[in-house]
Image: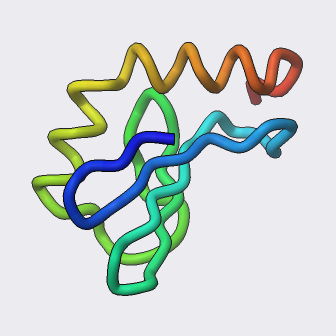
Amino acid sequence: MAKKEAFKIRIHDNDHPPPHCHVYCSDGSELVITLPLLIELFGKRVNKKIRKHLEERLDELTEEWDLKNPEKHN
């Protein structure tokens, strides 16, 4: 799990498709964002700081999804 400033990014094992990550914000809200397109599936809109962090780590996050969910792509 990555932690940066006021949010944490997590990818769960054996999660449902499509590939995605969960963003847990310090205000208690949660976002679910698709990988690699970074489209919001659930929660509030992604702010610029979170989007920038996701973009910077996109390859790493996509690889982590593939490792934790090898048979669940779409």
- Which residue is depicted at the point 50% across and 33% down? 35
The answer to whether residue 47 is above or below residue 63 is below
Residue 5 position in % (x across, y down): 20, 58
- Asked which quadrant contains residue 60, the reply is top left
Which residue is nearer to you in this view: 18 or 48?
48
Q: How is the image coloured?
A: rainbow
Q: Residue furthest left?
A: 48
Residue 61 position in % (x across, y down): 47, 26
The answer to whether residue 9 is above or below residue 40 is above
Quadrant housing the C terminus: top right
Q: Is residue 10 left or right of residue 50?
A: right
The answer to whether residue 48 is above or below residue 18 is below
- Which residue is depicted at the point 54% across and 54% down? 22
Q: Is residue 62 left or right of residue 69?
A: left
- Asked which quadrant contains residue 72, the reply is top right
- Which residue is depicted at the point 41% across and 48% down? 39
Q: Residue furthest bottom?
A: 27
Q: Is residue 53 left or right of residue 9?
A: left
The answer to whether residue 41 is above or below residue 53 is below
Residue 2 position in % (x across, y down): 41, 41
Q: Is residue 41 left or right of residue 40?
A: right
Residue 32 position in % (x across, y down): 53, 58
